[in-house]
Amino acid sequence: MSSGTRPKVLLFGAGGVGTVYLWLLSKAADTTAVCRSNFYVVKRDGFIINSSIFGQGLHFKPEVVRDCEEAASKAASVPYDYVVVCSKAIPGIVPNLIAPAVTPGKTAIVLVQNGVGIEQEYTDAFDSNPIISAVVYLPATQRPAGVIAHGEVEKLQLGSYPTSASQIPARAFTELIRAAGGTAEFHDDIQPRRWFKLLINASWNPICGLTLSKDTDILESCDEAGAVLLAVMMEIRDIANANGCAMTKEEVEYQLSRAQARIPLNAGIEPSMLQDVQAGRRIEVEAIVGNAVRMGKAKGVQCDRLEMLYVLAKALDLQIGRR
Amino acid sequence: MSSGTRPKVLLFGAGGVGTVYLWLLSKAADTTAVCRSNFYVVKRDGFIINSSIFGQGLHFKPEVVRDCEEAASKAASVPYDYVVVCSKAIPGIVPNLIAPAVTPGKTAIVLVQNGVGIEQEYTDAFDSNPIISAVVYLPATQRPAGVIAHGEVEKLQLGSYPTSASQIPARAFTELIRAAGGTAEFHDDIQPRRWFKLLINASWNPICGLTLSKDTDILESCDEAGAVLLAVMMEIRDIANANGCAMTKEEVEYQLSRAQARIPLNAGIEPSMLQDVQAGRRIEVEAIVGNAVRMGKAKGVQCDRLEMLYVLAKALDLQIGRR
């Protein structure tokens, strides 16, 4: 980290989640954002954040660039301390895109993404750089470009990848988020937190995306739905357990109960995969479902329902890609 | 049957399949068709059938009515010998709709529909009438209204319901189809034929409908797809076996191989449920998937994948119903 000065942060993926962290980090760091689909509107008008926590109508104009080559040319003398990746976790793409902005042995890469097994391609591509793995709870959508709606939760759980790597970079980034006014927890082992969030992501995301339904609509669709959802989550739990991340049945039931509790409030949630399908965008099927299925099968875990969801979501994703 | 005269047939459900049989039956019977969404165009212009088997540009103007009350009033003196139901198998609706045209103790009801467990509501509603259960192989679509495209297969398999009931009405209808130039097979027990067709219907229909994909696209989407499809079909086989309809693994593999063989030909098929989803129509989820799942669970058969498909298709169907 640039001692004595504010750390230098490049955000990659200025969607809802990324933009809220960009706004927070801009209070404690020198920030630049790679904007792709929203570049022109953000360059001209900046962002507006309407947040249930931080306030309505928050306007800011960050430094924006079109890609990491441009970001690198702006950072020629002082390299980036952090590249914060908030883009979708589609394998095989992002390491190449961020490479120009990553200084070997220096820049820490922070992965603020869903799914499991997403970190290895970064370790492979940047073997001298710290990799920080983060689990994010921050419901946010960007619609139209440059305008972010943010709900009532903001929490980041952080740890090093692999777990045996030095904790110093992840602890430093945790402190940076806190200094910026955000909520960050450091974890000695972040992987169990990834699996715990995966209980909801790998179940609700494909189920809602395939059926174009909110989560509560699924639970109300037929008598079998609640038991099937629990069974899918239990398969994810079994895979997590087989991969060294212990979770109890009570933790699984807690994750399911969050949707059940919203039925009487008529407050169904549209998971990101449903939003993506509705907008015609590719979905994070490998990071959120495929990797878990493969990690389960490698350990001999029975996960027929999750595998069924994987095949369906994979086919849907390919169909979206053809449009 | 009206001895010495042509039998009197009412068709309910003048979609692709129904219209081809209406055209055939009109050669050997006095026919009337209940047309609903296509009433005005068919009343004015009749139907055009473009058939790979029977010929292109076949034009005919059948007797059409708006509903079964109107059909009944036209048949006041001579009741219908057959009401042929070719509408979708959505439970709880059709028996009421056809009741005015069904003469107790006389009219045979012919169910030309997919799924299993679809007959009982007709037996319950018409306990003095013969119920004829039919499995149909006839790829046909109606687009626009009144214009039918029919592919290369036309086959009807028929039997009595329940199996123990008199075979006379089903044998007579089998002969009528043959006399009209169609392909009909009488079966002492039609239920195994229903389950055999269900191998493809209960698997491909929801899988293609949920993913908006042709069957071959599913098989090509990922390495896991072929095994998952076979596993779904094996669950259907296990449920069939538990319900007294023996099917071998080879029969299952044969049904799967039909799609596999079409991959190199780039000849994917759009099952009816996919066509329905694309057109925003309700899908036959209970007849094709739900009844099988319930019959499986009642016998203690493990059918996790099929149950997963049921919950997904059910939620999708309810979502379609809301639009």
Image: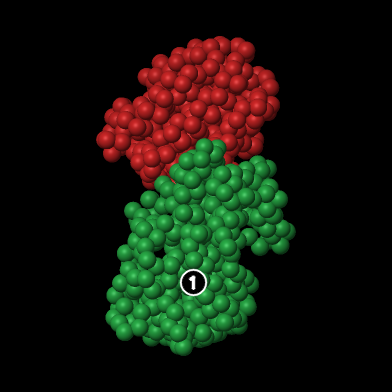
Chain colours: A green, B red
Mark 1, other Cα within 10 Å: few <14 / some 14–19 / many ≥20: many
Q: Which residue is disc 1 drawn over?
A: A169
x then y, percent, for residue A296: 51, 43
Residue drawn where x is 36% and y is 28% of the image: B258
Q: Is residue B94 visible?
A: no
Which chain hosts label 1? A
Question: From what the image shows, is residue A278 above or below residue A303?
Answer: below
The secondary structure type at the circle numbered 1 is helix
The quarter of the image holding the N terminus of chain B is: top right
Q: Which residue is at the front of the view, A192 or A130? A: A130
Hey, what amino acid is under mark 1? Pro
Q: Which residue is at the front of the view, B204 or A69? A: A69
x then y, percent, for residue B286: 59, 37
Question: From what the image shows, is residue B48 above or below residue A259?
Answer: above
Q: Is residue B205 visible?
A: yes
Q: Which residue is at the front of the view, A223 or A48? A: A48
